[in-house]
Image: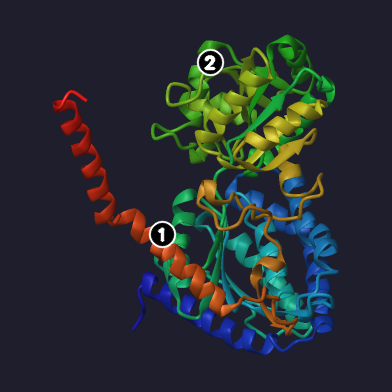
Amino acid sequence: MELDRDLCSLQETRNLVRAARKAQEALKDFTQEQVDHIIDMMREAGEANAARLAMMAVSETGMGNYNDKCFKNYFASRTLYEFIKPMKTVGIIREDQEQKLWEIAEPVGVIAGIVPTTNPTSTVIYKAMIALKSRNAIVFSPHPSAVRCTHEAAKIMQQAAAAAGAPEGVIGCIMNVSMGATNELMKHPDVAMILATGGSALVKAAYSSGKPALGVGPGNVPAFVERSADLAKAAEYIVMGKTFDNGTICASEQAIVAEECIADDLIIQLKKQGAHFLDPEEVAKVSKVVMLANGGVNPKVVGKEPKFIAQLAGILIPEQTRCLVAPLAGVGPQWPLSYEKLTTVLGFYRVADWHEGCERCFQLLEAGGVGHSLAMHCNNLEVIREFALKKPVNRLLINTPAAMGGVGATTGLAPSFTLGCGTWAGSSVSENVTPLHLLNIKRVAWHLGIPERKPVDPMNTQESSGRAQSQQQTSANPQIDAELVQEILNKVMQHINGMKCGK
């Protein structure tokens, strides 16, 4: 009897988790040297297949562009490897001689890896490497629009790991994708943790599964350009960040906020970088095709080039256009392009000064990017400090393309494709996720001594307590002295009698 597709997907998921659990039981006993050898071989396989996987991703999803997806695959392989290579993730990873403490790393177990359609292969490479570096097995759930390329990336990682000595089944990927299979994976009793990258609904489902989850929120990233900025460099980096893989990275710029005194000069520089500014009629047309009525981005334009969007909107743009820029007057439903747009479209705002710019950035973040990232092009440390102290973001990216800076490609942040947004966005982590987030840390603590206490005389304590209690009683229930009252009364009567006698 042939099983229905939904039943097949459920059974496949259970089989993959069962195999991953068995593999993880073996992997947890590997030495640091064995683990690092596995990771090195996975790095090599990721680099060797970066171009092929990029081509598969673009072909299957129709999102992004080949060159940038090559870079992302290479980044998830080589750059990530160099960052995590020195990490201790096995046995005693830290000894504190002064405090007499040992910290011991233990894997969390089988991890559910949710993969988005915007980064379907680089996310697999990244999550597989951080999972195995921390001696965890992982099972991936692909997006329905990216099953083949995601599965191929997982297969490459599994083969490389197995060739280096890892147990079979340590990396798995669902082929018969369904919502039921994803829910089964997240709620399976043998799954210990969820690494969720995707839409808000999916991330919310991960946090509602009853399992520990590391999820991310949306990133409506403002790029504030202050008067002290190098405008040519700011324009170059903003367009570079926004157009990187056609805007599919959640840390990419979504709106430019420019001080009025430098706005016109900035526009000149942006146009030199291939930005095409829309007139009011064009803004209305682009808004209708880019955004949906509920405020979400239209899936048809995600990761698309400006030419595609212009044709869809029925407008003409110069051939060399790299991104579309829409001047806006506010934030909210009346201005649809003020929300996150995972494509090559930017909003543009003018503000009187950095105080107003600070407020406008806050409005944009509140509209859908709170907790994520904010880019600043500024050389005034006082202004940077004010933004850093007051803005509800976990990544303030200074004078760098936000898309690359947020993931750690052009900044000192940890290389990562899971960018925590903290409690502001309902996330359990506020930094870029690394192998260290996938460990349980045991602690061994030695006796340091009994805390010194001040000697106390029990008798004195009782007497003091008694006196205090007596004073409290006297204050609360004062006792009347009868003899004193009688003496006062006698003197009063004598005085009265004396007055009656004319004395």
Quadrant where the N terminus sits is bottom left
Element marked by disc 1: helix
22 or 454: nearer the eye? 454
Around disc 2, counting alpha carbons within 10 Å, would you say few (fewer than 14), some (14 to 19), or many (20 or more)? few
Position of residue 176 measured from the top left corner of the image (x, y, whole percent):
48, 69
Q: Which residue is mark 1?
A: 471
Mark sitting earlier along the chain (2/1): 2
Mark 2 or mark 1, which is nearer to you?
A: 1
Is residue 241 shown above or below 20? Answer: above
Asked if labels 1 and 2 touch by Cβ distance under 8 angstroms, the answer is: no
Could you tell me if residue 242 is visible in this image?
Answer: no
User: Which mark, by number, is residue 329?
Assistant: 2
- Which residue is rendered at x = 58% and y = 59% of the image? 115
Around disc 1, counting alpha carbons within 10 Å, would you say few (fewer than 14), some (14 to 19), or many (20 or more)? few
Identity of the residue furthest to the left in this view: 500
484 or 248: nearer the eye? 484
Q: Is residue 169 left or right of residue 381?
A: left
- Which residue is rendered at x = 50% and y = 81% of the image? 190
Q: Is residue 85 left or right of residue 279?
A: right
Q: Amino acid at mark 2?
A: Ala
- Which residue is rendered at x = 84% and y = 22% of the image? 230
Colour basis: rainbow
